[in-house]
Amino acid sequence: MKKKIIFSSGGTGGHIFPTIHLMNHFFNKGYEVLLLTDHRGNNFLKNYKNLRSIILKVDTPTNKNFLRKILSFFVIFYSIIKSIVILKREKPDLIFGFGGYVSFPISIASIFFKLPLVIYENNMVFGRANKFLGIFSKKILVARKIKINFPKKFEKKTHPVGSILNKDIINHSKKIKNINKYFSILILGGSQGAEIFGKIVPPVIKIINEKGIKMQIFQQCISSQKDSIAKFYEDNNIKNHVFDFNQNILDLILSTDLAITRCGASTTAELVQTSTPFIGVPLPNSIDDHQFLNAKYYEELGCCLLLDQKNFNTSSLLNLILTIINDKKKLEIISNNMKKNNNKNVYINIENIIKELI
């Protein structure tokens, strides 16, 4: 009889894509898998017909006024009751939560059935939901050792396993050689788009292009900016590819000299795995400032350059890119540092831990 794992994750791509990758791994290994997610998370599953999901209405009491806090507690209570019903019907062998408010109801419900609970933290700061759920979990898996907001009492059941990435990225062979002598830049705004990148980056590229430096731009942006950004590059004879968040970007990553990116855990880990130097511009209002801490971790390892959004303007970005272009050795050093910090064993590590429990 097949072992069944219920996964729980939702919200932005940074949570949902590692979940999808891990679900596919266990599905291909013969496990039955099911995802409990919210409406946002479920939208990312459109291209994964083999994965079954149930949408759970969830909420969080944080950052709300008094009345909305009360309402959110009722929603959470309802979600826990619904999760209990789901567990009774599905009879899983294990619950695997990826943190965040979406994972909370099913993780709490698992206590009533004495099911093993495993939680995973991808960021450099231990999330609020995971900090609470860690009390009930059998195992806590982390991408790397967490130094911030991590209770010492959890250390014995905590295992650094690596970042859960697309297997194509983990197993990539080598960078695609740039034979046209363009300096290629990849701009990534994450699933939320980073509108500021669409305003600041194109004028900077125009100035560099006017200096006689051949540029090639791959820019991910929000849909409302896509046409105007593409037109700007075309009007200024800049080789470009402007795209939205859903595109598979492995070939673009392997073709680029430098990335400018938000600092979600998955995106930064993908760039490190492929030895692609990047300028990290953390989302300033990310929960627990986790994007800054993700970027700071890699900056201290010599794997990226960090630029706060408050200092992210035409002048600062122009000077930084020109410094990099004029000192190619800097890119080589960063790329070599990245090769020391990538990880290929994450799926084996997680699978071995799961096998200990079920």
Image (cartoon, rainbow, N blue to C red):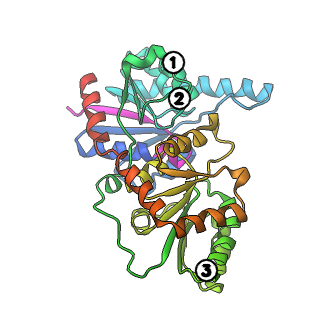
Residue tagged 1: 151
- Local secondary structure at mark 2: loop
| Quadrant housing residue 65 | top right
* Residue 31 spot, x, y in % from top left: 26, 38
Could you say which is closer to the camera, residue 338 or residue 203?
338
Q: Amino acid at mark 2?
A: Phe
Q: Amino acid at mark 3?
A: Asn
Q: Please report the residue visible at 22 percent of the width from the left and 41 percent of the height from the top.
A: 30
How far apart are labels 3 and 1 at the CA level? 50 Å
349 displayed left or right of 267 = left
| Relative vertical location of residue 283 with respect to residue 255 in this rendering, above or below | above
* Residue 6 spot, x, y in % from top left: 38, 33
Q: Pointers 1 and 2 in contact (CB under 8 A)?
A: yes
Q: Is residue 144 magenta?
A: no
Please give the range of residues in magenta. Answer: 1-16
Residue tagged 3: 209
| Quadrant housing residue 217 | bottom right
First along the sequence among labels 2 and 3: 2
* Residue 209 spot, x, y in % from top left: 61, 80
Q: Amino acid at mark 1?
A: Pro
Q: Is residue 12 magenta?
A: yes
How far apart are labels 1 and 2 at the CA level? 9 Å
The mark lying in front, picked from 3 and 1, is 3
Residue 126 numbered mark, or none: 2
